[in-house]
Amino acid sequence: MTEQTNNANSYRVDLGDRAYDIHIEPGCLDGIGEALSTVAGDARRCLVVSNETVAPLYMERLRRSLERAGWRVSECILPDGERYKTLEIWSKILDALMQARLSRNEPVLALGGGVVGDMVGFAAACYRRGIPFVQVPTTLLAQVDSSVGGKTAINHPLGKNMIGAFYQPKLVWIDPETLRTLDERELRAGLGEAVKYGLIRDAEFFLWCAGHARQALDLDAGVLSILIHTCCRHKAEVVMADETEQGMRALLNLGHTFGHAIEAMTGYSEYLHGEAVAIGTVMAARLSGQLGYARPDIEGEIRACYEGIGLPLEPPRFEADAWLDAMGHDKKNIGSRIRYVLLREVGDAFVAEDVPSDAIRTLVASFD
Amino acid sequence: MTEQTNNANSYRVDLGDRAYDIHIEPGCLDGIGEALSTVAGDARRCLVVSNETVAPLYMERLRRSLERAGWRVSECILPDGERYKTLEIWSKILDALMQARLSRNEPVLALGGGVVGDMVGFAAACYRRGIPFVQVPTTLLAQVDSSVGGKTAINHPLGKNMIGAFYQPKLVWIDPETLRTLDERELRAGLGEAVKYGLIRDAEFFLWCAGHARQALDLDAGVLSILIHTCCRHKAEVVMADETEQGMRALLNLGHTFGHAIEAMTGYSEYLHGEAVAIGTVMAARLSGQLGYARPDIEGEIRACYEGIGLPLEPPRFEADAWLDAMGHDKKNIGSRIRYVLLREVGDAFVAEDVPSDAIRTLVASFD
């Protein structure tokens, strides 16, 4: 946390001809129409994709803003939840794009959380080999992480986010006021992902998150603003340095190798993504200690922070082989080796590809 | 046809960090193992995808070459035909990739014609957000056109190639001897696509094709070599100038706006792609004449060439509204306007976006 950046409203994610802005402003949902006109040229039609939970809350406001700016709006409503992040539901978005007859220059908007954003982004990447898309994230997790950076995907029965594309949005439009309608469990999960930036690259921000969890859960506007701004700045910096995850972007996967395995083993229906990642991060911290990379008490510090947020911390019980099998299908695995993000210290993470399976067996057993 | 290029074996498609070679050599199928090792680093596993027609002919040779070079080979066999270029069959390739547990650096090979190449390329683009892929085209159409340039796709019930990605192969490996087992109807369709380069940018090559159709159909090795080399050189030049079809690459779609409509209206089962494009090119030539862009007798010259090849020339009978509707769904349509590639002269094509629907009605009526 090198500076507080809650004065500016925007960050530029500078990726050459794929550059775009992240705009963060309370109430900005009502300004999406004009904003879309600035990034989508002279197109006049768009498709808004949302889910059954978010659409009743915000679709009409979005539509009014878009129509005021002269847009013709089609809609597509998906079922809500990670277990619907499938090829089958994804194909419904493609059907809606085809039925709306969107042309190559006409944009699609993702109104919702990470699942909607990932699926719509991937549909935008593939429909007519790529049309513009705009992220309008309404969950904390999507606002602090998944809406920025162009990772789009759907799940495969054998592994999370295994089918997808690197495809950047033309705009990320964040209205923190949408968090007022967010389920508190979702809010906690989002805070867990925010903490991740602290753990991998900003020790000061980790402490700040631990100290402001209560205010964030109480939806203190100032705290949420600092939180979202700081996370978006970190995410933008990492993505600009390594758009397609050849190197440092992999650090953002802290807790995700274990976390994705947890989601897959439990059928994408028991844990929210942010919850699984929190548990996975506890496991990664303990593994870092067991392998001698980090102080043993780093796990306790992370647990204390997550407890303040109210996140689950104990991994579900599965045999070590089930863990290894589920992680072997994780796409971050290169050449059959499983990649783990480990910690040296709070704020200092690295990728390890040479963790022996026995170490994972020991780790899993230590949670019994 | 500025030069004969049948001396060299390779063309470089120079697209910066997405550059790759097109290798053309009789018998080179037996050398794919070593070639793959040069483009896929230290990976040791691969998946070969083919179809029920091609696999019995060439899979074993490919496998032997790969295994000699130390590759562990998995296989995936698809049904044969354009009507299987669907989301459902595409997902079988994804299942095979998941089951083979290919990592991010392990390649997939497409052994077959344009359908296999397009589907495998699109699966390679999406699996783990992109893995290396290699084209091993075994039909003339794939060898002269679809295997080069990175257009990958599947069909949607409402339009051809509507779901896909620009995703370049790491290598295109062309063995002209595979044409010996090709159905003659497929050979004719491939020749039709070859003629296209003559029509849009090389009048001399158009005349050469017309004069050598018989020898090509008789599988004269020298003629096929010149044919494939010339087409690959043209395709590489166009793709290097305009990888993602912002401009001149659109000219390669001559005959395709009508052709894709023909394929869609007939359920992707009556015409081969090259046949539909030949008919579509006759329609585009007549339209060019009717609108005053070209000499009226240009249509006759093109018909004479296609007749020598033995291609169908008469469009199927549909109402003008059905044509317009089918073409409105074509992905080259921008901002609701339908884009047509028209001719000024043999060797000189351009994109027209302002063709009124009445002109299409007149055109369709003129074929009654």
Image (cartoon, coloured by chain):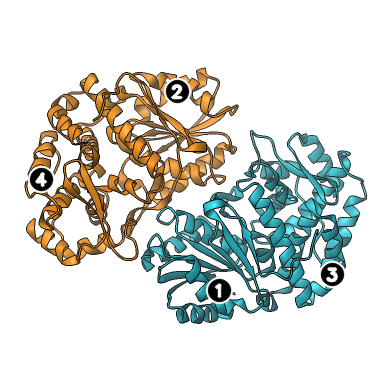
Chain colours: A orange, B cyan
Q: Can residue B235 be seen in this view?
A: yes
Measure the alpha-carbon separation of dots 4 and 2.
43 Å
The residue pinned by badge 3 equals B212
In this rendering, the label closer to the viewer, 3 or 1: 3
* Residue B77 visible from this viewpoint: no
Q: Residue beneath label 4, please?
A: A298
- Distance between the alpha carbons at the discs numbered 3 and 1: 31 Å
**Disc 3 vs disc 2: which is toward the camera?**
3
**Residue B325, position in %: x, y?**
68, 41
**Chain letter of disc 3 in the image:** B
Residue at disc 2, secondary structure: helix
- Looking at the image, residue B260 lies above or below residue B309: above
Residue type indicated by callout 1:
Glu
Residue lying at 73% horizontally and 36% vertically, measured from the top left: B353
Same subunit, labels 3 and 2: the answer reads no
Q: Nearer the viewer, mark 3 or mark 4?
A: 4
SS at badge 3: helix
- The residue lying toward the viewer, choosing from A79 and B331, is B331
Mark 3 crowdedness (10 Å alpha carbons): few <14, some 14-19, many ≥20: some
| Callout in the foreground (2, 1) | 2
Residue receiving disc 1:
B52
Q: Mark 2 points at which residue?
A: A32
Which element is circle 1 on? loop
In terms of sequence position, does the residue under pointer 3 or pointer 1 come before the other?
A: 1
